[in-house]
Every structure is written in structure tokens, then in C-alpha cells.
Amino acid sequence: MSNRIFNPDGVPPPVGHYSHLAEVAPGRRVLHCAGQVGRDEDGSIPAAFRDQARLVWRRLEAILAANDMGLGDVVKIVIFMTDMAADIATLREVHAEVLGPDVKPASTGIGVTALALPELKLEIELVAAREG
């Protein structure tokens, strides 16, 4: 049995690239990934939100791959943004680009006043589940 991701009747459709509900099938291995930020291996942080978002997803994909998982195994995303009003449209574009049309995990976006470093604009944590 695979993970079930869907939007139940009686709930308005999602506004972005996500689903309202994700259910992990019994017996699946679950990975809880700490929040990842747009900081490169050398410690540099791109100024542009889009560049930070793409870097975050590269890091998340590497973490998933190191655990024999991929983006299709993601069931939940929590997104922290320092300027949601300015950057939400860009985030939706990057999510659609990275996740493709079929991967729409349950997601929550949270506006925050700051992240761990002042240059950071975005942090994403996720939960993934896979058989085995």
C-alpha cells in the first residue's frame, strides 16, 4: 500500500502546489528532515529568494537520496518565510518546477520575523515515507 495524498470533499481546493491530507501507509519507513535553508556548502547565502528556494530543494533532495527516498515520497512540508507577501508567488513557481505536477504533499506555510541568520528568507522541513 502506498502513501495516500488527497483533498477531501467539503474542503476548499488548495491555493498552491499542495494537498490538504497525507496518510502514511502502515509499515512504512518515515524520515523527519530538519529545516533546511538556502546556505551553500561554503556558507554563502544567495540574495535572491528564488535562488535560496532552489538551493533548499537541492539540499532536501540530497537528504532524501541519501536515505533511498525521492520527492515522490514526501508527505508533509512545513515552510517558514520571512516575507510571505513578497515571495509566496515565487515559492509556488519553484515548488511546481521542483516537485512537478504530481507531487503535492500536505503543506503548511508560516510567516516568521526572522530565521537563524539575517540573510535567510526561507526554511523548509519535511516528512517523507517509503516502503522498507
Image: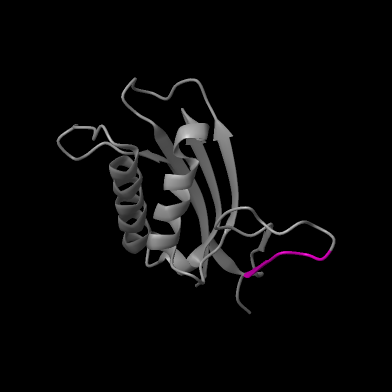
Q: Residue furthest bottom?
A: 1
Q: Residue at x 34, y 20 (%)?
A: 118
Which residues lie in the magenta part?
4-9
Answer left or right for 128 relative to 8: left
Q: Nearer the viewer, residue 52 or 75?
A: 52
For image coordinates 42% across by 46% down, the residue present is 90
Q: Is residue 33 visible?
A: no
Residue closer to the observer: 39 or 129: 39
Look at 37% across and 67% down and name the residue there. 68
The residue that appears at 18% across and 40% down in the rendered structure is: 41
Q: Picture quarter containing residue 46?
A: top left
Report the front residue among 38 and 90.
90
Image: 85 above or below 114: below
Q: Position of residue 100 (x, y in %)?
A: 44, 68
User: Vertically, is 2 above or below 48?
Assistant: below
| Callout count | 0
Name the spot of residue 1 as percent of width and height, x first: 63, 79
